[in-house]
Image (cartoon, rainbow, N blue to C red):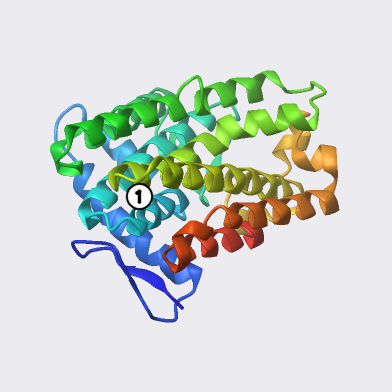
Amino acid sequence: MIASAAIEQSTLEFIEVPVSIENALHDAALSVNRKLDELIQPVNGAEARVYDAMRYTTMVGGKRIRPYLLINSAAIFDVHGDYALRAAAAIEMLHCYSLVHDDLPAMDDSDLRRGQPTAHKKFDEATAILAGDGLLTMAFEVLAHPDTHPDGGVRAELCHALAVSGGAAGMVGGQMIDLASENLELDIGAITHLQRLKTGAIIAFSCEAGAILGHASKEQRQALINYAHDLGLAFQIVDDLLDAEGDAAETGKPTGADAAAGKATFVSILGLDRARQQARMLGNQANAHLEMFGRKADPLRWMTEFVISRKS
């Protein structure tokens, strides 16, 4: 098998060693964690508490799926390893900010995240809000820094793409629809649109960013975006399945929340069996978009299988 194990080298190379997706995820997570630790350093002074909350939010658990996608998309185009790691750290900062805010009492009101107390439980609501704000803005600070790429045009394009996917036309818009949808009758088209924004937009950026860093062609970039859109929907369907029938001890967060809130989900509309079938179909469709990249895209194909079969 081919694995992306050399992410600390000058380029992200694929090495022929037999590793599982879990090992590949673990290796990517370790490298991204080191980069996050480097970028979000603890400080002294009155502002120390918000830095502590930012570090707690980013460093406690997490599979680092989005960084993995970015790293391995960038590897297709032989992107310099540190460029990819910095961009991967930035997307994880934005993802973690969204989790902090989603967990707040004004939104999902969750006490548990990644098997640990949520940020507002560990610290307090005001600190959690500020920690989320700090992570969001730091993500753009990292992408805009010359260390992320020597080409200013690439850095600007990364910032623009993240702003679109993370803002009201993407993740934030999807969260707004999600909050407004409680106790409403949504059809499958509306649910698909909601999740393409809320979950899929950031997953799409994670793959598109690798193409941006690598000066990929328009066709190559679109293929990765199409892969990510299908993967993102499959991811959300599996998330809905886990919420409906998962074990909180295994998932690391409360289950049954969607049903309790009266939210329409893929599972509530399709049922368990059809939802599983739809997730598998989307996974196959996602992998079909990777054909032009040959074996270099194998780590992305592994991710598809991981998303479909995950238990947490």
Is residue 238 shown above or below 122?
Answer: below
Q: How many marks?
A: 1
In the image, is residue 46 above or below residue 55? above
- What amino acid is labelled 1 in the image? Met
Q: Secondary structure at mark 1?
A: helix
Residue 31 at x, y percent in the picture? 29, 59
Residue appearing at x 39%, y 35% in the figure: 94
Which residue is more in the foreground, 176 or 154? Answer: 154
Q: Quadrant of residue 133?
A: top left
The relative height of residue 27 versus residue 90 in the rendered view (above or below) is below
Residue 67 horizontal side relative to residue 244, left or right: left
> What is the x, y in percent for residue 188?
78, 33
Asked whether residue 122 appears in the rendered view, the answer is: no
Please provide percent x and percent y for residue 207. 43, 46
The answer to whether residue 108 is left or right of residue 244 is: left
69 relative position to 38: left or right = right
Is residue 243 or residue 75 the one in the foreground?
75
x 37%, y 44%: residue: 217
Pick the quarter of the image with the C terminus: bottom right
Mark 1 neighbour class, 10 Å CA radius: few under 14, some 14 to 19, many 20 or more? some
User: Closest to the observer: 33 or 78?
Assistant: 78
Q: From where the camera sits, is residue 98 visible? A: yes
Choose between 138 and 254: the one closer to the eye: 138
Residue under pointer 1 = 59
Residue 119 x/y as whole percent: 44, 36
**Residue at 83% in and 50% down:** 274
